[in-house]
Structures are given as structure tokens and as C-alpha cells.
Amino acid sequence: MLVSAKLAPTFAYPELERFWRLADELGFHAIWNYDHFYGPDAVGTIARDYRKDTFEAWTSLAAMALVVTRARIGCMVTGVTYRHPAVLAKMAVTVDHISGGRLEFGLGAAWHEAEHRGYGISFPRAGERLAMLDEALRVIKALWTEDSASFAGTYFRLDEAICNPKPVQKPHPPIVVAGQGQKSLRIVATHADEWNATGVDPAEWSRLSNVLDSHCEAIGRDPATIRRGVQILLDPAQEKQMRNRLDLLPAYQAAGCQHTVLNFNQPPTEDQLELVSRLGQTQR
């Protein structure tokens, strides 16, 4: 099982860079950040009126692309409502080139209403956001793979749009979609190279993975072509919490999980990160 490390861009830049470098040196499969404008509170949720300093995800990712030289990099996950997909496609191509073809492209339907309200960004109901996600993935893949792309959807339009250069990775960077509902899993089956679920125990993760299998079968896709992943939240200030969460890794692996993203809610110590990297290596 692949093991990756994640830290939100809510800390001073030197702390972020230290984490990126150390995780890269320790051999994690990938290093991730997240896409929010308001920072998380101490327990990893996002409060409506929270004001923690937060760097923008994709400009941070461009910096990470140069600091990290071996691991893959990505944003888990970009909110579809925050940027027009054509602009996001260009941003992702740029980071793919900066990293030498190590980008993992994560996208989701977004969820934090207060963030949208604060920034004046439209926040449609969940069903519309999922429809936007489906259209956005069609737009982005067309821009990455076609000489010029046209698209006429409900939410997005292209008119002989050009996106050059193309990504380093062919046909495009791996697409990671996060989601756990029926509609989300249908979108995963249609578009994704990897699926990620967050905050579910191994039994529920296994159930959702089986639902994803059924959606793949319904459209004639081989379920084995989608990597299965989980995101686990870790609090370095609580050693017992970290141990309990890490003890679940064998159960996730037995259920068919192929990739675990360990999401630290604050920078771990060097010893903690090294310990976690060793535990991850035992799952391979």
C-alpha cells in the first residue's frame, strides 16, 4: 500500500518547506496540501468564522514542485467551485511541468459554504456542485488532450479553446476524485484514476469501494483500473490518537485500499514523521 503525507498550507512557509523536504527524504509516495481559504481549527474541522492564516493551494503547490524532488505532489482536493476549469487546467499543466511530471490532480465538489459566502463565490446545492464536477472533468480532460476543445454544458463552455503546452504526463496527470455519495462515486467511475474517501472506518470504506465497483460495471469499466485510497486525520499532539489511527492501516489494506494519505493537522516532529514513514513501509 502506498503511503503519502499531507499538511495544510496553514503554517509559516519555512514550516511547510521543512515538512515537504523531510517527507520527500523519508520516501513518502506523494506529498499533498489542500484547497481552502480559511484555516482549520485544532481538531481538523473548518469553523465558520475562523481566521487562521492560510496560503493559496496552487501557488503553494508550485513552490512544492521545486522543493520536492522525488515524491509526487498534489492538492487533496481542489474545490470545483473556486476556479473556472479551463483556468485550472492551465494551472495544473504548469505545475506538472515545474515538477517534471509528478502532479496528481485532485478535484472534488467543494463543501465549505462560509468560504464561498465570504469570497462572493456562488455555492449551489450539492447536486449542482456534483454536476459541475462532472462537467469540469470533461472540460479539463478535453483541454489536456485535444488540439482545440469545444464544450457546451450547463455550467461551462469552451469555444475552440487551446491549452498548450500539454501536460508532461500522457494522456494527462492522474485524476483523483474525492467523494462518498452515490453521485460522487458515479463520477469517480466515469472519470477518475483514483478514488479517495475521508473519515470512514475500514468497514464503511469497503462498502463504498463495492458501490464504486457496481458503478464501474454499469458503464463497462474495469474496476481494477481505479486505485482505491483513504485519507486518515492525525494529530501529532496526541500520540494515542495517532497510534489508534495508524493501527487501522492493515484493516484498510485488507479491504483493498491501495493508498493511504496521512493528513497531519499540525507539523509533526521529525521523529514522528520518520516513525510514520517506517510504519507505511511495512504495509508495502
Image (cartoon, rainbow, N blue to C red):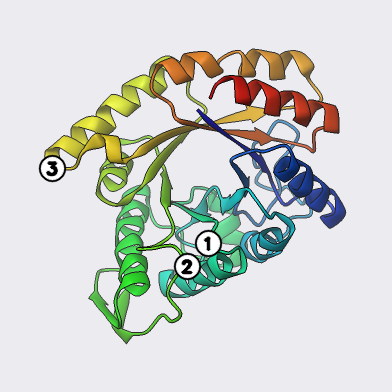
Q: Dot 3 corresponds to which residue?
A: 220
Verify CB contact (< 8 Å) between mark 2 and mark 1. Answer: yes
Name the element at disc 1.
Answer: loop
Measuring from the top left, give residue 78's x and y in whole percent: 52, 55
Q: Dot 2 corresponds to which residue?
A: 168
Q: Dot 1 corresponds to which residue?
A: 101
Q: Where 27 sits versus 65, above or below? A: above
Is 230 on the left or on the right of 193, as rendered? right
Q: Nearer the viewer, residue 43 or 201?
A: 201
Measuring from the top left, give residue 167's x and y in whole percent: 45, 69
Residue 269 in sight:
no
Residue at 62%, 48% in the rendered image: 71
Is 31 on the left or on the right of 182, as rendered? right
Q: Amino acid at mark 1?
A: Gly
Q: Where 187 sits versus 233, above or below? A: below
Is 74 on the left or on the right of 166, as rendered? right
User: Disc 1 to disc 3, how far (Cα)?
Assistant: 29 Å
Residue at 37%, 52% in the rendered image: 125
Residue at 37%, 48% in the rendered image: 126
Measuring from the top left, give residue 275's x and y in whole percent: 75, 23
User: Disc 3 to disc 2, how far (Cα)?
Assistant: 29 Å
User: Disc 2 to disc 1, how far (Cα)?
Assistant: 5 Å
